């Protein structure tokens, strides 16, 4: 693995439309499939999904070898966890439930080397096993490693005006379902008050030129976000898509006479 220019970061800077998928079935083969299917990125979920360090390393390597920027979603801002994932070669980190500016700062610090943060350096795959000059690696890692935050609760929304003032945030991702639960609307992700908060999130990001990633749940939402200038999208979760496809295929075959 040789750290190079991050294609996802370049597309975000250019404001190209990018489409990702939430990876809840951790598998090197599926990561490769995402790449060949044409996805711009994937987010491997370790917040809700059980996965060993070894399997995670294989997924990161498969994505890297097939040219897919793989972001890894973690449950909190633990610096040791973030450091190990980035050392393994992930293109970036996605931190769930960011609820304060202090937490956002902790994420940035964990993902960046000094003087931008406090990430510790080690030899290994990320530095080409010592073949890459360390300062070159540090400079490139600080430039190309993506820091993405998920806003999924009322406290996160309240803190977002301060969070978007921070440097080195590459993308803000909405979390409508958890946000709806936090706001007291249960699973009503399309409730007008929940959607109003998500659109406020997008507006705050746009005002500070921070890419906002939407998760459209209906074709109408997809069209609406595109009309509003949103360029980054998570189209859903592989687990749900695979289940629906298998179920529909089985039902279609059963109906065939």
Image (cartoon, helix red, strand yellow):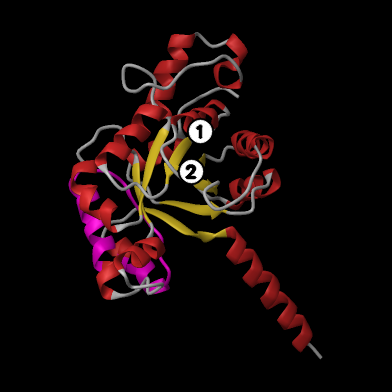
Q: Of callouts 2 and 1, which one flags the residue occurring earlier in the amino acid sequence?
A: 2
All told, the count of numbered labels is 2
Tell me the crowding category of disc 1: few under 14, some 14 to 19, or many 20 or more residues within 10 angstroms, Cα based. some
Q: Circle 2 is placed at which residue position?
A: 74
> Which residue is found at the position 51% from the left and 30% from the top?
86
The part of the image, by quadrant, that contains residue 219 is bottom left
Considering the image in quadrants, where does the C terminus appear?
bottom right
Considering the image in quadrants, where does the N terminus appear?
top right
> Which residue is found at the position 51% from the left and 41% from the top?
72
In-front residue for pair 166/186: 186
The part of the image, by quadrant, that contains residue 146 is top left
Farthest bottom residue in view: 257
Whether 89 is among the magenta residues is: no
Q: In this view, does 63 lie to the left or right of 8?
A: right
In-front residue for pair 50/111: 50
Residue 155, placed above or below residue 136: below
> Which residue is found at the position 37% from the left and 21% from the top?
118
- Percent across and percent down for residue 214 are 37, 58
State whether the magenta stretch is mostly helix, strand or loop.
helix
- Percent across and percent down for residue 70 are 53, 41
- Contact between marks 2 and 1 (CB within 8 A): the answer is yes
**Element type at mark 1:** helix
Image: magenta residue range: 196-224
Which labelled disc corresponds to residue 81?
1
């Amino acid at each position: 693995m040789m750290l190079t220019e991050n294609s996802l970061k370049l597309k975000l800077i250019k404001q190209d439309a990018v489409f990702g998928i939430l990876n809840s079935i951790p598998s090197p083969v599926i990561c490769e499939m995402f790449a060949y299917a044409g996805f711009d990125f994937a987010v491997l979920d370790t917040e809700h999904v059980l996965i060993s360090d070894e399997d995670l390393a294989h997924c990161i390597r498969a994505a890297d070898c097939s040219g897919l920027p793989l972001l890894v979603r973690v449950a909190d801002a633990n610096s040791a966890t973030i450091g190990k994932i980035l050392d393994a070669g992930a293109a970036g980190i996605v931190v769930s439930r960011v609820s304060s500016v202090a937490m956002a700062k902790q994420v940035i610090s964990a993902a960046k080397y000094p003087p931008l943060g406090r990430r510790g350096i080690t030899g290994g795959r990320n530095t080409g096993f010592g073949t890459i000059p360390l300062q070159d690696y540090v400079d490139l890692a600080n430039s190309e490693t993506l820091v993405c935050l998920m806003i999924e609760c009322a406290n996160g929304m309240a803190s977002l005006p301060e969070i978007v003032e921070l440097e080195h945030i590459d993308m803000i991702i909405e979390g409508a379902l958890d946000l709806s639960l936090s706001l007291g609307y249960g699973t009503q992700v399309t409730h007008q008050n929940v959607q109003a908060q998500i659109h406020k999130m997008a507006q705050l990001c746009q005002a500070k030129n921070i890419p906002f990633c939407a998760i459209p749940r209906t074709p109408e939402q997809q069209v609406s976000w595109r009309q509003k200038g949103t360029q980054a999208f998570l189209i859903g979760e592989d687990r749900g898509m695979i289940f629906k496809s298998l179920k529909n295929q089985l039902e279609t075959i059963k109906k065939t006479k």
